[in-house]
Image: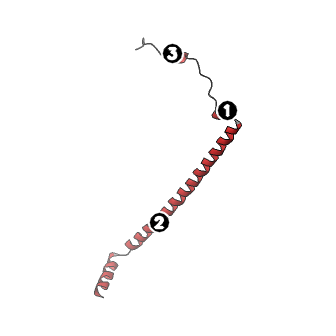
Amino acid sequence: MCSSPKSSGSSRPRRAPIKSIAERLTSEQRARFTLVANRAQERRDQRQAINKRWEQRNLDNCQQKARAINSTSNSSPIIAWFAKLYFAIR
């Protein structure tokens, strides 16, 4: 294994330095890019606000259902049995 040929990757010439995307844009293209990016951010913000309201509404509904279930299950079984007996006799 030690005598196997090694890659010559380190001897390859370096490519041109990578420039940022903004350096290659004209001022009109940069203004258009900014406009599109700002619109996208506004849509993201709106979507997050809608999702937050939806989650809060569903959380409130779940909490109300849990309270309703807990309030009915808190009554003792003896009281429930007497209530059934009372309504059965009437």
Colour scheme of the rendered structure? secondary structure
Q: In the drawing, what numbered circle is on residue 8?
A: 3
**Residue 3, placed above or below residue 38:** above
Disc 2: which residue = 61
In this view, the mark in front (1 or 3): 1
Q: Residue at x 63, y 45 (%)?
A: 36
- Dot 2: what SS? helix
Q: Are marks 1 and 2 in contact (CB under 8 Å)?
A: no
Label 1 Cα neighbours within 10 Å, binned few <14 / some 14-19 / many ≥20:
few
In this view, the residue in front, 84 or 34, is: 34
- Dot 1: what SS? helix
Amino acid under disc 2? Asn
Q: Residue at x 59, y 52 (%)?
A: 45
Disc 1: which residue = 23
- Dot 3: what SS? loop
Does 32 sit left or right of 49 as displayed? right
Q: Residue at x 58, y 17 (%)?
A: 13
Mark 3 or mark 2, earlier in chain: 3
Q: Residue at x 63, y 25 (%)?
A: 17
Amino acid under disc 3? Ser
Does 80 sit left or right of 40 as displayed? left
Q: CA distance from mark 3 to mark 2?
A: 65 Å
Mark 1 or mark 2, earlier in chain: 1
